[in-house]
Amino acid sequence: MAEMIGKYEILRTLGKGATAIVYLCRDPDADREVAVKLIRLDSDNAAMSRRLLKLFHTESGVGRRLEHPHIVHIYDAVVEDKQAYIVMEYVDGTPLDQFVSISKLLPLHRVIGIVFKCALALDYAYRQGVIHRDIKPANILVTADDDPKITDFGLSLNLQHNGGGNSTFIMGVGSPAYMSPEQIKAYPLNQKTDLYSLGVVLFQLLTGRLPFRANNPATLVYRIINHDTPSICALNPNLPAALDPIMKKALEKDLYNRYKNGAEFAKDLAAVRYQILEEHETQEDTAHFQMLRDLPFFADFDDVEVWEVLRICVWRDIAAKVMLMREGEEDRHFGIIVSGYVEVSAEGRAICRLGVGEVVGEMAYLHPKNHKRRASVVTLEPTVFLEVNPGALALSSDEVQERFSKVLVERVLDRLAEADHILAQQGQRAVGADSSIPFAGMGGKFDLELLP
């Protein structure tokens, strides 16, 4: 006999949390599949049961009032002696938190479309008197057609019933990394707090990282309140420049300068939509990834780190006989030759020719004080060049920065050794070439001859 929750037949488990289990069930009356969130009430912990019931009533009450194509609809809510359950619209989708790692990012046009729809849904919710307060990727489901569904209104603030503090029954609600500065400070909230959180979601979907990161909650909170938001285009130079002011406004700490509503946020997102490359973008990214993966330069990089490199660097296709770098210029940009050949020269004389996998411009980048180019670099044939912006690299993960530092130092040392070899072939016979000279060795014992 099939297991039941009330009149609803359990088909399978969809997910489990700390306080609830979500099942896929069949509604016999409406003949449709529904999601049922079941909350077990603990008779031994009355305080926890009261809190869960408060969440339950908030989610069911708010959810029934919200009728929007991008908000999960609530059909029914039942409280029994030992359990309570909410019957919701079943969404055959994937949580957005599956697309926030650097190796699994969605194409730009899809991200913009999803966040655009979420902004309009939050705008609608606020006009119904509801603030979500816990917008994060895990609370946004996305269907195969890129239709987002915002879920989990259990922490929402009901502005229509805010008397006596009943709607702020949990202090510090929300997920810290996505919380607005005013939410962290426990200030009164309005719709702008949800728009800030949605801005953090957009930032993460486009860059594969959060705007503020830290090893502990206290440092994270400090950075959210006090640090400027990193430039999204510095982290991913391939993004349209128009996204930077949008992100800055969405993550503005000053409420007066932040987006006033979701419709305004959505309007600005729509304005950059025409600049976006679409279907071929994912295939192109995958091809570029494989080309980097095959280069010796990235041999020690993990796959996720190579994906991150693609996001922070600029992929350039350059014709033959084009100057990449000019001797004497102040510039710390460097790069890796993905295909083609270049000539390196100084004072009008050729030094060497470099091909696939070689790095150029690294000396100006590595030198702590002198960032002047010591040589010119010219392409000899059509060349694909991966350009690295030092500013973007500085904002990348610690792992990527460490990989670059290690490989660049190795390349410089190898080139110094090769230069020594070439100079040795052109130099005069050395005193040390005499086999009769005794060898002391580093750390060995040897006699000192005191000069008069």
Image: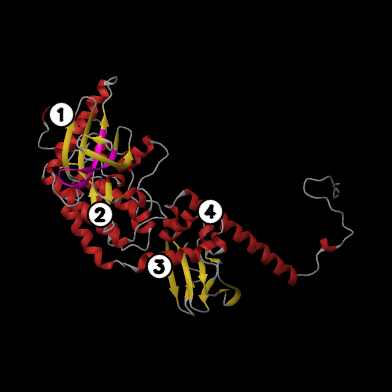
> Marks 1 and 3, Cα distance to the nearest angstrom?
53 Å
Badges 1 and 2: C-beta atoms under 8 Å apart? no
Q: Quadrant of residue 344?
A: bottom right
Helix, strand or loop at label 2? It is helix
Nearer-N-terminus badge (2/4) = 2
Q: Is residue 434 visible?
A: yes
Under mark 1, the amino acid is: Gly
The residue identified by callout 2 is 115
* 35 within the magenta span: yes
**Is 30 positioned to the left or the right of 412 in the image?**
left
Under mark 2, the amino acid is: Val
Helix, strand or loop at label 3? It is helix
Under mark 3, the amino acid is: Glu
Q: Quadrant of residue 422?
A: bottom right
> Marks 3 and 4, Cα distance to the nearest angstrom?
24 Å
* 370 within the magenta span: no
Nearer-N-terminus badge (1/3) = 1
Question: Quick check: 263 above or below 374?
Answer: above
The residue identified by callout 4 is 403
Give x and y (percent) for residue 137.
Answer: 30, 47
Disc number for residue 131: none
The residue identified by callout 1 is 165
Nearer-N-terminus badge (1/2) = 2
The residue identified by callout 3 is 284
Look at the image and give the residue range highlighted in magenta. Answer: 22-38
Helix, strand or loop at label 4? It is helix
